Image (spheres, rainbow, N blue to C red):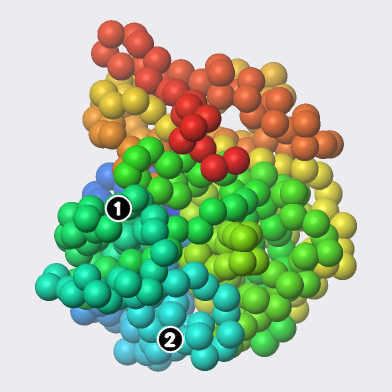
């Protein structure tokens, strides 16, 4: 077995979601090649080599893997990139917990829905349409409707539609963001949202966390994650049902190892799955898990990529968590983010445990329509739900990102736009 310092790993993405994965791989002594089209990606300076390339460009990613003679491949926090991971691994004979077929089922909503229905995974009503669709296809669905690309992530191209007459422009928006030029039209489900994280170890599912998922929904956009609160309000008695659903998800995808991250909603008809990815969460959940569970998914992901996974033990159904925790994502008004405030004052006050900005000084912030519009994050821990909510609110009140006139652009959304 190779030692970590003899490893050469290709990590797809050098953005905020992969930053700590890159740093951890380097800390373990590996030669790290990152692939990201952004020459200024924050993870690029941490890597041994940076290849400027779109993460979804499979031929170029494969060429980079061969050029640098890598023996491992990984990514984190991104659904669609898993297709590239699986394809490069297959082409180069690298270890990978996902087959190409499994990666497609986990990232394409058509293939995903077919697999879910076969395995009895509970989902809401959903149909798929193309550019010239017949509105009669939507007749089985109850209004209002959600329209989204069949193969995208981060709520990009997603709209809430109250009237059937408004479906066509929403479909056109979704198609612009779909590589397969297909849109999913779904029934809008109401109820408390949760995020569930799990780890698969040789076919056995370990439930890691169930958090309350607070979302920001500025019309017509929908489902932009704003907070993850652990433990959530979900009764511990429901954990078995959630784990059972995730086990069926794994069977539907055809995966036996690695992370699962699911968004669910408790609707009037019971638990329903909204989205699932074969990756850790893109809202810094790895930091939350490390602080509140003592579980380090970064090492788990690298061990899996290096083909020597360690036995996994933690399971929320059986094991006690260490403390309460909360991830908050930061949003800002339109304008130039001329100056970002520092995190040190909040750390000194003991309000936050960790945090970071997704953007740099000078970035022009647009109106928020999807998860990519968020500008930063921070983590709060404490002894109770009340304590972490109070600390998170105080930290948000003190955050400053100023425009060129000195006005603070950070804002907390109006309650009418939140699903709390």
- Closer-to-camera residue (16/412): 412
In this view, the residue farthest toward the left is 132
- Read off the residue under disc 2: 114
Point out the image quarter for the N terminus.
bottom right
Disc 1 and disc 2 in contact, CB within 8 angstroms = no
Dot 1 or dot 2, earlier in sequence:
2
Q: Nearer the viewer, residue 313 or 242?
A: 242
Res 8 quadrant in image: bottom left
Secondary structure beneath dot 2 equals helix
Q: Position of residue 148 (x, y in %)?
A: 32, 61
Q: Which residue is drawn at 40% across and 15% down?
A: 408
| Residue at (24, 49) in percent of width and height | 39
Question: Where is residue 189 drawn, in percent x and y?
Answer: 50, 58
- Mark-to-mark CA distance, 1 and 2: 27 Å
Q: In this view, does 188 lie above or below 96?
A: above
Residue drawn where x is 38% and y is 83% of the image? 111
In this rendering, position of residue 341 left or right of residue 360: right
Residue under label 1: 163
Q: Residue at x 32, y 89 (%)?
A: 91
């Amino acid at each position: 077995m190779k030692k970590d310092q003899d490893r050469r790993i290709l990590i797809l993405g050098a953005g905020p979601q992969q930053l700590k994965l890159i740093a951890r791989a380097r800390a373990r002594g590996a030669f790290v090649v990152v692939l990201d089209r952004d020459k200024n990606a924050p993870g690029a300076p941490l890597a041994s080599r940076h290849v400027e390339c779109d993460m979804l460009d499979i031929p170029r990613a494969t060429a980079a893997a061969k050029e640098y003679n890598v023996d491992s491949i990984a990514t984190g926090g991104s659904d669609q990139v898993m297709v590239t991971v699986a394809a490069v691994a297959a082409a180069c004979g690298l270890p990978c917990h996902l087959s190409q077929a499994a990666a497609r089922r986990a990232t394409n909503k058509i293939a995903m829905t077919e697999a879910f229905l076969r395995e009895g995974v509970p989902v809401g009503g959903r149909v798929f349409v193309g550019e010239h669709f017949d509105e009669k296809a939507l007749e089985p669905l109850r209004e209002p409707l959600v329209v989204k690309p069949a193969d995208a992530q981060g709520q990009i191209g997603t709209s809430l539609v109250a009237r059937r007459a408004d479906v066509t422009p929403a479909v056109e928006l979704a198609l612009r963001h779909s590589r397969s030029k297909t849109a999913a039209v779904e029934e809008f489900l109401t109820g408390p949202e949760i995020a569930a994280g799990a780890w698969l170890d040789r076919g056995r599912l370990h439930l890691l966390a169930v958090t309350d998922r607070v979302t920001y929904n500025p019309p017509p956009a929908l489902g932009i994650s704003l907070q993850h609160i652990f433990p959530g309000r979900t009764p511990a008695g429901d954990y078995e049902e959630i784990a059972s659903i995730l086990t069926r998800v794994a069977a539907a995808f055809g995966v036996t190892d690695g992370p699962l991250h699911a968004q669910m909603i408790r609707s009037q008809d019971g638990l329903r799955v909204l989205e699932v990815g074969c990756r850790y969460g893109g809202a810094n959940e790895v930091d939350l898990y490390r602080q509140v569970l003592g579980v380090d998914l970064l090492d788990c992901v690298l061990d899996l990529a290096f083909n020597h996974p360690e036995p996994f033990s933690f399971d929320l159904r059986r094991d006690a968590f260490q403390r309460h925790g909360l991830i908050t994502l930061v949003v800002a008004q339109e304008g130039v983010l001329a100056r970002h405030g520092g995190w040190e004052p909040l750390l000194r006050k003991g309000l936050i445990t960790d945090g970071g900005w997704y953007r740099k000084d000078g970035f022009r912030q647009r109106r928020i329509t999807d998860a990519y519009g968020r500008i930063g994050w921070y983590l709060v821990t404490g002894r109770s739900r009340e304590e972490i909510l109070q600390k998170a609110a105080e930290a948000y009140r003190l955050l400053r990102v100023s425009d060129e006139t000195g006005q603070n652009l950070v804002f907390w959304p109006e309650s009418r736009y939140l699903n709390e």
